């Protein structure tokens, strides 16, 4: 007999998580309701609190409870080096693994015209303002090595070029098509420390 009603709605809701299919969602649902109702209650409360309290940092757009995230609020960070990533998880991975002492800009996505994601959705207007502030001397492109990630890197390179700012790209070593948040720390450190100047293909440089 297939679950219905509240059980079915919970299973469907759990499938919004990455990597969770119908069977995994069913196992989670039965585990929470049969064996760990207190854990389920705590999970529900934590999710609700996060939805109510967590928003985007006014400077870098990562997830935070305050107006500014801890990195943007830290006066000891090097604000001349700006690392552009696709997700908050990737900013966290770079900050944890590489010893990078600069600041971040989190796109919360990547350019994908077919999906209706353009510069406005990524708030590249905020990034352009930061590039025009004359505070930044290097933009480090750490977008993923997918087709969309590369297109996003090219777009941001052009923005930085117009502002007269040096642009670097983290070195390959991160697998093509890979997601930074799942790369081990040693590989990520090697790629980050081996970053190089970013150039468009011949004939495409502004």
Image (tube, helix red, strand yellow):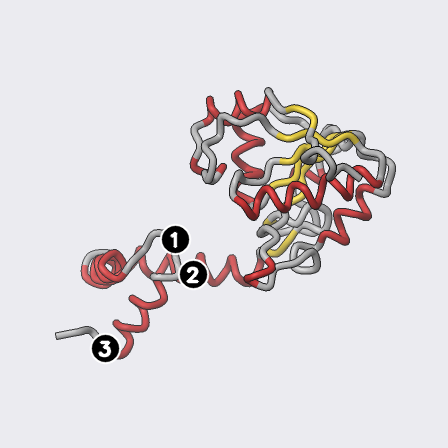
Question: Does 8 appear above or below 129?
Answer: below
The answer to whether marks 1 and 3 mark residues whose Cβ atoms lie closer than 8 Å is no
Dot 1 corresponds to which residue? 18
Count of numbered badges drawn on the protein: 3
The dot on residue 45 is 2
Q: Is residue 88 rendered to the left or right of residue 136? A: left
Question: How far apart are labels 1 and 3 at the CA level?
Answer: 23 Å
> Separation of disc 1 and disc 2 at Cα?
21 Å
Q: Residue drawn at (68%, 30%), measured in percent from left and top?
A: 198
Nearer-N-terminus badge (1/2): 1
Point out the tag, 1 or 3, that comes first from the N-terminus: 3
Q: Answer with left or right where residue 153 lies relative to residue 8.
A: right
Decide which of tag 2 and tag 3 comes sooner along the chain. Answer: 3
Residue identifier under label 3:
4
Residue 144 coordinates in the image, percent (x, y)? 54, 40
Q: Nearer the viewer, mark 2 or mark 3?
A: 3
Q: Nearer the viewer, mark 1 or mark 3?
A: 1
Q: Where is residue 68 shown, x and y percent of the image?
A: 69, 47
């Amino acid at each position: 007999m297939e679950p219905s009603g509240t059980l079915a709605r919970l299973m469907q809701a759990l499938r919004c998580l990455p990597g969770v299919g119908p069977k995994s969602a069913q196992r989670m649902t039965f585990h929470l309701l049969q064996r760990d109702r207190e854990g389920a209650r705590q999970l529900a409360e934590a999710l609700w609190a996060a939805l109510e309290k967590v928003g985007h940092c006014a400077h870098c757009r990562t997830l935070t409870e305050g107006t500014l995230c801890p990195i943007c609020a830290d006066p000891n960070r090097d604000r001349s080096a700006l690392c552009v990533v696709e997700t908050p998880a990737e900013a966290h991975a770079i900050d944890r693994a590489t010893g990078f002492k600069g600041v971040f800009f989190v796109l919360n996505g990547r350019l994908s015209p077919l999906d209706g994601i353009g510069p406005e959705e990524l708030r590249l207007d905020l990034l352009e303002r930061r590039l025009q502030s004359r505070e930044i001397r290097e933009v480090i492109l750490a977008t993923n090595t997918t087709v969309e990630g590369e297109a996003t890197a090219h777009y941001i390179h052009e923005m930085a070029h117009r502002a007269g700012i040096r642009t670097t790209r983290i070195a390959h070593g991160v697998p093509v098509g890979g997601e930074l948040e799942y790369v081990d720390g040693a590989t990520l450190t090697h790629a980050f420390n081996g970053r190089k100047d970013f150039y468009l293909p011949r004939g495409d440089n502004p």
